[in-house]
Image: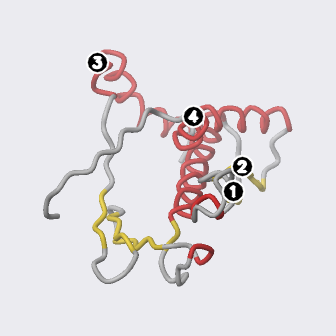
Amino acid sequence: MKAEDLRALQAPLKDRYRAEPAAAKITLKAQGSLDEASLACKVETGRAIATAGLHPATGGSGLELCSGDMLLEALVACAGVTLKSVATAIGVTVRSGRVSAEGDLDFRGTLAVAKDAPVGFTDIRLSFALDTDAPQEQLDTLLKLTERYCVVLQTLRRPPTIEATLTRGRA
């Protein structure tokens, strides 16, 4: 896709959102169903069903997806799409590239082995390796704008208010 194609694709959306700010606010949803036979949750991805289970470090078989891995995969996907979009918009040619994310966990927290051990990631590293001839100044801009506009990255950096509820009922 070329920059002008991206602009043409997004122009009507941007115009509408400027005129009707409420139209830009949507609610994304995810659903899953609990597996009756195992410690797993079947998540509807929109394309397929992904079965999430315990990580092997917490007693899982390793056959199901670990939700921590899924979070990192969502970060990689969002950052990769954002980087490609920004590169297109600012005219940086990227022939190919890799996006990687890794995160550090202390499973003592998840397993309630040590109260001082955190539950969740303590550090996450996101990196890009690009095949490009762009000058460093453009690459610095590309990274800065990718960080600025990546939804998952910004959500992790500035966590939203999250409310959890539990109700009785049949699925």
Identify which amino acid the numbered label 2 is placed on: Asp
**Residue found at x 65% / y 51%:** 118
Outermost right residue? 136
Q: Earlier in the sequence, mark 1 or mark 3?
A: 3
Q: Earlier in the sequence, mark 2 or mark 4?
A: 2
Question: In the shown orientation, is residue 36 left or right of residue 151?
Answer: left
Question: In the shown orientation, is residue 56 left or right of residue 92?
Answer: left
Residue 166 placed where, x, y %? 26, 50
Crowd around label 4: few <14 · some 14–19 · many ≥20 (10 Å):
some
Task: Measure the alpha-carbon separation of dots 2 and 3.
Answer: 38 Å
Quick one: SS at disc 3?
A: loop
Q: Earlier in the sequence, mark 4 or mark 3?
A: 3
Residue at which label 4 appears: 149
Total numbered badges shown on the rendered structure = 4
Label 1 with label 2: CB-CB less than 8 Å: yes
Task: Measure the alpha-carbon separation of dots 2 and 4.
Answer: 20 Å
Q: Earlier in the sequence, mark 2 or mark 3?
A: 3
Residue at which label 3 appears: 20
Residue at which label 1 appears: 103
Task: Measure the alpha-carbon separation of dots 1 and 2.
Answer: 6 Å
Q: Picture quarter containing residue 20?
A: top left
Q: Picture quarter containing residue 34?
A: bottom left
**Residue found at x 36% / y 63%:** 45
Image quarter where the C terminus lies is: bottom left
Task: Measure the alpha-carbon separation of dots 1 and 3.
Answer: 39 Å
Identify which amino acid the numbered label 3 is placed on: Glu
